[in-house]
Amino acid sequence: MKLKKYLALTRAGILESFQYRMAMLVMVAGNLLYLTVVYFFWKAVYASAGTSVVNGMTFSDTLIYLVLATALFNFMEMYTVWEIGRNIQSGKIVLDLLKPMRFRSFLFWSYSGTFVTQFFFTFLPTFIIVCIVTNGAVPLGINLLYFAVSVVMAVIINYAIDFMTGTICLYTESIWGINIMKQVIVLLLSGANIPIAFFPDTMKTIVGYLPFKSIYNTPLTILLEKNPDITVVAEALGIQLFWCIALLILSSLFWKISLKKITVNGG
Amino acid sequence: MSKIIEIKNISKEFKVLNRREGLKGSIRDLFSRDYKIVKAVDNISMSIPQGEIVGYLGPNGAGKSTTIKMMTGVLEPTSGEILVNGNVPYKDRTKNAQEIGVVFGQRSQLWWALPLIESFRLLKDIYQIPDDNYNNMISLYKSLVDIEDLLHKPVRQMSLGQRTLSDILAAFLHNPKIVFLDEPTIGLDVSMKSKIRTLIHALNKEKNTTVILTTHDMGDVDALCQRIVIIDKGKMLYDNDIEHLKGFFGSYRTLKVRPAGDIGKQAEELEKELKNLSVSITADEEWISILVNEEKSKVMEVLGTIQKTHDIRDMKLEEISTEEVIKKIYEEGVE
């Protein structure tokens, strides 16, 4: 069975992440710290605005959005760029290339186990806590299904962008700068750090034409919409699907061309 | 015997930026288009039958790894033809990967945090090894080496020797037709080295696996290889069996002496005293080895000179060793 070899990698990923219990704890602590900063920052923003609704969002709307964005980030961030970059520098990439599997699939499925653990250990608990604390601010209905579909596509888009950024490392042989740049661009333009509703109009228009929005803003908007309109949701999912396909093709082509130029270290 | 690897006139060129010195030079390098072409592999041909163990030798930077990367399909040759198991490796990399195994000396393909058995199970699924074959292989491993304890140990807690051993077992697990071993014994102690050599030998015999071995340790070559291929600066220097190679150096003898006193110090003195007899001297903990070319000076003459000033406790006369042959080829080439 074909799927079995991929699921074997998922299983190994789950086993591996349990080996690093401390890392999980530290990550939870780090997130709490980040969320504290977010809380006080936006509190100040709303206090200085003088109104309770800014750009169509109340303080608690904004906070719910950002808390869930952080949880989603922990779930979706795959550190692919680091992984590819490190493997290129150490030369380990040769071993990965010699698996009877496409490199892109190998890398994705190797990481997929962490999706499972992160989902159960960070996203789900955060989501449940938010639901309880806000007492009904998060609608629980058909939107959860739309959200699930949207997240799957968001993961694919995010991975394709990461993979392309990682491919650049084949040329530069350095990771740090490229990774930071990618991270800043993605987190800002996707609406993970600041809800897109707060962007000035020109920025909103530009962001509308870029794929990043589909990573965080789309799934979160779908999740938090109290009266989902099926046509709006369908349009958002359609745009996601378009980016999914486009970026998968693009990243695959870019990788194929780049691999020809590869000069593996220690050769 | 059918040929498992066919290589015809392959070359590989790399484009390398001409680097300038100093801060100013580095800044100018940012905009430089001044490339030079480096030929890492230059017109190499060979064909290897199924089941052979080939020692692929050459000094550092000779182009060994580049050739191996072309055979495995990671690199595409600039020119020439290459067929591995009927596939063109760089075109059918994933298909080719199913039929080969690799061990790169200092890197591990094993899952770092997991016990070895988990890595094996994963590889079983990745390579889609049928249950029977997998179980047979594991019991074969158990009969060859003592892996019971290793199986449940996380790879990151293993010693270098244990890890290398595990990596070799992992490379053979899907019963590939060819296994590439790139310096498998690097950094290992004497007993581990011999353990690994025995293992490779046994697996080759048992499964008729072709093994391409690169190494700098002539002990590996003596223990395993019938045939050796030597390259340097990308060019093929030699491709034949070891005995034949030693024939080139038929007039060479190794005179081994054990003098009284400190061996290192004695060796240094001998170096000076035997200067005009054109010999080369190496020393280990037990013996001082003096390589004598009988066409230039006689062994008895060398021995006589030594005895004048040194007290010899023990001596023996040997043929030229593989190590010395290879050293001479690296330094002087094959005439």
Image (spheres, rainbow, N blue to C red):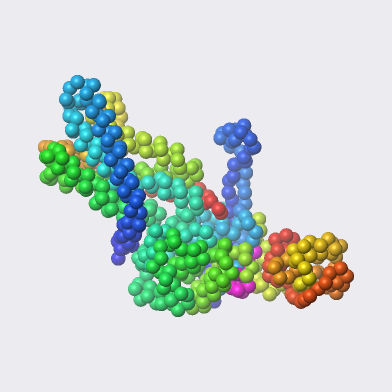
Q: Which of these two is toward me, B29 or A52?
A: A52
Q: Is residue A157 left or right of residue A223?
A: right
Name which residue lies at 34% across and 73% down. B131
Q: Which of these two is toward me, B332 or A241?
A: B332
Q: Quadrant of residue B139?
A: bottom left
Q: Quadrant of residue B128?
A: bottom left
Q: Which residue appears farthest toward the front when viewing the image?
A: B261
Q: Is residue A218 above or below residue B310?
A: above
Q: Is residue B229 magenta?
A: yes
* Image quadrant where one finds the N terminus of chain A: bottom left
Q: Which residues, given as a range, are shown in magenta? A: B220-230
Residue B274 visible within the image:
yes
Q: Is residue A175 left or right of residue A267?
A: left
Name which residue lies at 38% across and 53% down. A107
Q: Is residue B37 left or right of residue A175?
A: right
Q: Is residue A43 above or below residue A243?
A: above
- Where is residue A98? Give x, y as percent: 45, 59
Q: Is residue B11 magenta?
A: no
- Where is residue A79? Give x, y as percent: 37, 46
Q: Which of these two is toward me, B187 or A255?
A: B187
Q: Which of these two is toward me, A204 or A185?
A: A185
Residue B133 visible within the image:
no
